[in-house]
Image: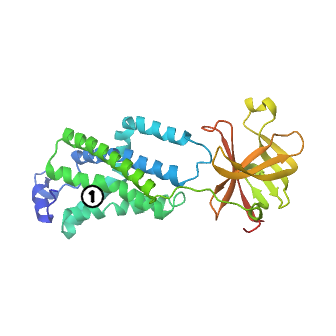
Amino acid sequence: MGWGNAREQRIREQHTDEQGRRTGPALWSATDLGAAASVGGAQLPAAGLLWWIDAATTKDDYGAGSGGALGALCVLLFAPLLLPLLGMVVTFALTLPSVVLARLAVRRLGGPAWVWHLLAPAAPAAVWGALTAPLWPLGTSVPVLAALGLLPTLWVGLARRRAWRPWGVWWRAALGSAVLFAAALGGGILATETGLIQQYEPPKLSTGRLAGVWRGPNGAELRLSADGRARAVRLPAEPLGDDWLEKDFVTCEGSGDWRAEHRTDLGRDGIRLRLDGDCGEDTDWSFGGSEDAPELFVLFGDPDAGTLRILRPAEGGSAPG
């Protein structure tokens, strides 16, 4: 790969100060910036595709159908316009500190340069993972960030040793982007078809698990009884008559009844809720979430851009399965 040991690296990468004195290898240069940005952006289409495959197969789409897929494909279509900018973000957040750390380690500790370039991305990934811990778990953010910093860090070291010109760096990165995308697509399809990626399955909820209190945003509450009776407080419901042309849903209160049903359009089970009075139409709530954390949801309006409402069991308010 053109990686040398510490002594060979110092010979090839001598850096001088303003007085012309040799100070050792330069830790960072303008050429490194272009190399880092090129691969930092080139890897993102493949990374985005893998993220979409995971989201589309292992996560609940709440009946949104192909809307999420079409949105992801649009992002992939226009991504080339943003890739250089996003590559710079990856460069300054992950690649630059990784390369500097790797070259400092080679200078101070010696050893194969490629090993330090391979290990260094873990450090900035851990820092950013700790900073974003309130938003994402460390077990997810750190490996993902380390993976995003790995290829650009290795690429910078390789590009310097091969002495590639800027255009040579960019066309190689573009070619690599296409190869990575094809590999991600083929690997994702293979993993899905062979069962390595488990497809999402909505939970099966018995009457015993449905009976109890379900709560949602804005004070929404639904009490279901095992005998089929229901009580709603500030619960969203399908609008009456022509009201659906003006609003996605209405908020209703009162009593009524419910029954289990199978939603053939969504391919999952749920319940049909009928409230007494003239507040709203019968509303079909579908099962979502998981066996351990079940949900009731309904998507009002346009399936691709509708209003999603989710109810979850209240603490101590749902009977055990």
Q: Is residue 150 above or below residue 80?
A: below
In the picture as drawn, the residue positioned furthest to the right comes out as 277
Say which quadrant the N terminus sits in. bottom left
Q: Is residue 9 above or below residue 164?
A: below
Q: How is the image coloured?
A: rainbow
What secondary structure is found at the residue carrying circle 1?
helix
Q: Is residue 240 above or below residue 236?
A: above
Going 33% across and 46% down the picture, which residue do you hit?
182
- How many discs appear? 1
Q: Is residue 182 left or right of residue 158?
A: right
Q: Where's residue 237, x and y in %?
A: 78, 43
The residue under label 1 is: 100
Q: Where's residue 250, x and y in %?
A: 78, 39
Give the crowd class for mark 1: few <14, some 14-19, many >=20 residues within 10 Å.
Answer: some
Say which quadrant the C terminus sits in. bottom right
Going 75% across and 49% down the picture, which residue do you hit?
218
Q: Is residue 203 above or below residue 166?
A: below
Q: Quadrant of residue 191?
A: bottom left
Going 9% across and 59% down the picture, which residue do you hit?
11
Q: Nearer the viewer, residue 287 or 72?
A: 287
Q: Nearer the viewer, residue 199 or 88?
A: 199
Q: Where's residue 146, x and y in %?
A: 37, 59
Q: Is residue 6 left or right of residue 66?
A: left
Q: Is residue 25 left or right of residue 290?
A: left
Going 14% across and 54% down the picture, which residue do you hit?
15
Q: Amino acid at mark 1?
A: Val
Q: Nearer the viewer, residue 263 or 188?
A: 263
**Can the viewer see residue 116?**
yes
Q: Where's residue 91, x and y in %?
A: 33, 49
**Can the viewer see residue 17?**
no
